[in-house]
């Protein structure tokens, strides 16, 4: 009888072990399948650095909120460009600000391009004859113009108006302007970018950000010989956004 009991216990333990051996891999697969891994690149408009990130998102809260791993930022452009940048890069705002360049979940999905990809990809364009980065070469050959252009490009990026950069740089490349002419080109595209971005922010009722963007655009409008339609539209938006900002502060 004791022998039968012992054999029975061994049989039970055996089948428990078999069950666990089958269940554990399935559990591990379930945990893996209920999490999504994002990898990607971010860009700082203050320092012109990029950094890589990896984020593991758990679909079930009981498994945790997810883990983010971020690499140290590295310059994405040459000193011929970054030496002209303005603003402190170690302020809390600058250190916290990273705009999306691209992200990818793998599993056959197509990578998503963020707005900062416009500038990052532009900075990677090479000159066809020298194989040197085209805007690095331009900045080396035109230091006085570079000193005007890159702080302006930086402000365009800071105000999320990346979308005007390709056409702005294309016009500079095409017209080969002098110092006064490049300032006029920058002003024209900055006002256009400020208007489009501020209207988007107004639609989202992001009043403080919209007002900041409007004021940035108007700083160029004031230097125009004759105010452009875009400049006039920015002035119309000032009173609207200011009233909403004042109302929010009173609440």
Image (cartoon, rainbow, N blue to C red):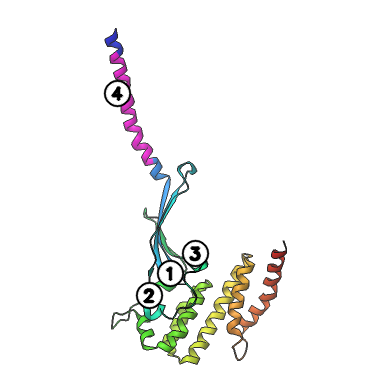
Above or below, 28 against 136 in this view is above
- Label 1 or label 2, whichever lies nearer to me, is 2
Identified at 62% across, 87% down, the residue is 227
- Horizontal relation, residue 77 to residue 2: left or right: right
Query: Which disc number belongs to residue 77?
Result: 2
Q: Is residue 215 magenta?
A: no
The stretch of residues the image draws in magenta is 6-29
> Where, quadrant-wise, is the N terminus in this rendering?
top left
SS under mark 2: loop
Judging by the rendered image, the residue that carries numbered circle 4 is: 14
Q: Is residue 110 visible?
A: no
Q: Report the mark closest to the observer, 2 or 3.
A: 3
Residue at the image position 47 percent from the left and 77 percent from the top: 165
> Rounded to the nearest whole Å, what is the CA distance between mark 4 and mark 1?
57 Å
Category of crowding for the residue at label 3, using alpha-carbon neighbours closer than 10 angstroms: few (below 14), some (14–19), many (at least 20): few
As drawn, which residue projects farthest toward the top?
Answer: 1
- On the image, the x and y values in percent for residue 38 come to 41, 55
Q: Which residue is more in the foreground, 107 or 72?
A: 72
State the image coordinates of residue 128 (x, y, percent, origin top left).
Answer: 30, 81
Q: Quadrant of residue 48?
A: bottom left
Say which mark, if any, is on residue 117.
1
* Marked residue nearer the N-terminal end (2 or 4): 4
Label 3, secondary structure: give it. helix
- Is residue 190 found left or right of 25 in the rendered image? right
**Pointer 3 with pointer 1, Cβ within 8 A:** no
Q: How far across and down, in percent of the image, does residue 199 sit?
A: 61, 71
In the image, which disc is placed on residue 96?
3
Query: Label 2 to label 4, Cα distance in Å?
Result: 63 Å
Mark 4 or mark 1: whose residue is earlier in sequence: 4
Instruction: Give me the C-alpha separation between circle 2 and circle 3.
Output: 20 Å
């Amino acid at each position: 009888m004791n022998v039968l009991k012992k054999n029975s216990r061994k049989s039970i333990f055996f089948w428990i072990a078999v069950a666990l051996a089958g269940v554990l891999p399935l559990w591990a697969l379930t945990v893996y399948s209920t999490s999504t891994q994002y990898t990607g690149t971010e860009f700082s408009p203050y320092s012109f650095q990029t950094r890589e990130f990896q984020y593991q998102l758990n679909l079930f809260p009981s498994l945790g909120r997810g883990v983010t791993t971020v690499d140290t930022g590295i310059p994405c452009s040459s000193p011929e460009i970054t030496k002209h940048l303005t603003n402190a890069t170690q302020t809390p705002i600058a250190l916290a600000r990273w705009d999306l360049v691209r992200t990818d979940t793998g599993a056959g999905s197509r990578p998503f391009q963020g707005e900062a990809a416009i500038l990052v990809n532009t900075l990677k364009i090479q000159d066809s004859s020298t194989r040197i980065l085209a805007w690095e070469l331009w900045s080396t050959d035109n230091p006085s113009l570079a000193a005007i252009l890159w702080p302006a490009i930086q402000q365009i990026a800071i105000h999320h108006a990346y979308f005007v950069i390709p056409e702005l740089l294309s016009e500079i490349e095409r017209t080969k302007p002098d110092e006064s002419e490049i300032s006029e080109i920058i002003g024209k595209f900055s006002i256009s970018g400020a208007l489009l971005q501020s209207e988007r922010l107004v639609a989202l009722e992001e009043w403080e950000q919209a007002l900041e963007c409007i004021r940035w655009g108007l700083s160029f409008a004031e230097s125009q010989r004759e105010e452009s339609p875009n400049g006039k539209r920015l002035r119309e938006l000032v009173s609207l956004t200011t009233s909403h900002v004042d109302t929010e502060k009173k609440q």
